[in-house]
Image (cartoon, rainbow, N blue to C red):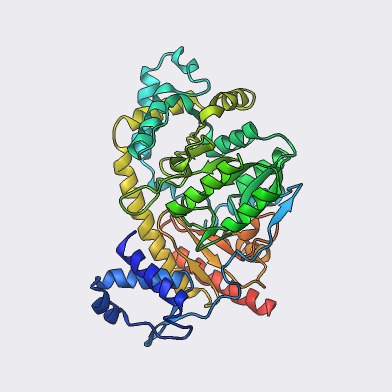
Amino acid sequence: MKKYQQLAERISHQIELGVWHPGDRLPSIREQVGHSGMSFMTVTHAYQLLESRGLISARPQSGYYVSPPAPTTTPGMSAPLLHQENVDINSYIFDVLQASSRAGVVPFGSAFPDPRLFPLAQLNRSLAHVARNTSAVSMTENLPPGHRELRQAIARRYAQHGLTISPDEIVITTGALEALNLSLQAVTEPGDWVVVETPCFYGALQAIERLKLKVIAIPSSPHHGIDLSALKQALHNWPVKACWLMGNHQNPLGFTLPDERKQQIIDLLALHQVTLIEDDVYGELYQGNQRPAPFRAFDTSGITLHCSSFSKCLVAGFRVGWVAAGRYARRIQQLQLMSTLSGSAPVQMALADYLTTRSYDTHLRRLRRVLAERKQKAWQILRQHLPESCVITQHDGGYFLWVSLPDGIDTRALNTAAINAQISLAPVSMFTFGPAGLNGFRVNTSFPWQEREVQAVRTLAKLLRHAQAMSS
């Protein structure tokens, strides 16, 4: 944990214990520097982190004060445990994504990072090299599980982060979404119960709908992640077959679970013999010196299918993902042969070629730095212009911010108004099939924050104030 995070956690714990009460003025940044011995920037960052969590608030010319408690003890945790036998959300998600993709729309609702951050020239050189040096026969050698050299390169990436995974259990897929879908299909039958978070990546809900599965939604909080007690309740009361979770830079809320919580979840799922489908597409987009460990790192029972891709960290258009599937690798290959057959052979070979150049880590370091800078700038702009009733949650890593709104604001109506104003959002209704226990929307911060984006935030602030007035 970084120094500013340590200070933020210490102050948060003091607030929890009653050392500081709602309305109390905290020591000024200068005073805190003197008390803690930390730098001015470290203390400032800690206070900003506490403010983004809604624990403290800044008053102009006065300082930082402890915020009053939220209406519920932990945002998102007071929601009832949702369970439903039929999920019907795909048509709504399709409509939102179609509207968001129109030309000229400010892409706050986009799921993909700014494509100009990708090393397209180097990737194109790898594609050209493959085209010049590949025979017609070699193009047919990439049926499931996929190109051997690419699977070896992915296995080496795992090894760099302390995980020993054989290339033979890695199946290359057409993006992470296919990896996740095939994994879910491999371990369930129609009518089985599946656990997801709420809110969660909408692809999970679409997959559940397509496969005719039953769903149990466990509340998650922007600050604390999944409600472990609710997960225990679900596993005790229902014959759950699979659990679909994100432990790192969760979409849409952005949190990363601490290692202790990941271990607890793995132990709980292993106890009930429930397979974990891990969506780890943002794992490489961390801040600091160390990649956060995936759930797979804590699994000694072989219950985790670890899914990821290059779409969020290298290039979106190539649509190359994979699953480290363990004992399910053969079953997933069989399912893939009945659907997409295999991913693009030239693209797989080009990625394998690029990864041998050792440019990937250089690219990732630059990408992480730029994403962190843009996210911080976005947080400052949103905080400056949005109404005080909006709580903007910021976590290290990834490129999303979560904006929490008062309960009375209809995010579907807000999204429609935003689209009419040429602004796309990702409202909470995209990420849940019922009440999520919190209200808000996700913002993509990966694009340059220039005058167009600032003007879009000003417009959004006006829409929010109007929506709030209508709800009161």
Along the viewing direction, whichever of 119 and 200 lies nearer the viewer? 200
Question: Which quarter of the picture shows residue 274?
Answer: top right
Q: Does 392 appear above or below 204?
A: below
Image spot of residue 120 (x, y percent) = 38, 39
Q: Is residue 26 left or right of residue 239?
A: left
Can I make out residue 189 in this image? Answer: yes
Q: Quadrant of the N terminus?
A: bottom left
Name which residue lies at 48% across and 80% down.
Answer: 67
Along the viewing direction, whichever of 457 and 29 lies nearer the viewer? 29
Q: Does 103 appear above or below 143?
A: below
Image spot of residue 15 (x, y percent) = 44, 76
Q: Is residue 151 left or right of residue 110?
A: left
Can I make out residue 431 in this image? Answer: no
Name which residue lies at 52% across and 78% down.
Answer: 388
Q: Is residue 298 left or right of residue 125?
A: right
Q: Does 192 appear above or below 371?
A: above
Q: Quadrant of the C terminus?
A: bottom right
Image spot of residue 41 (x, y percent) = 28, 70
Image spot of residue 331 (x, y percent) = 59, 25
Along the viewing direction, whichever of 417 and 267 lies nearer the viewer? 267
The residue most toward the bottom is: 62
Along the viewing direction, whichever of 248 and 424 lies nearer the viewer? 248
Name which residue lies at 70% across and 52% down.
Answer: 92
Name which residue lies at 60% across and 39% down.
Answer: 273
The residue most toward the front is: 271
Q: Is residue 294 left or right of residue 7?
A: right
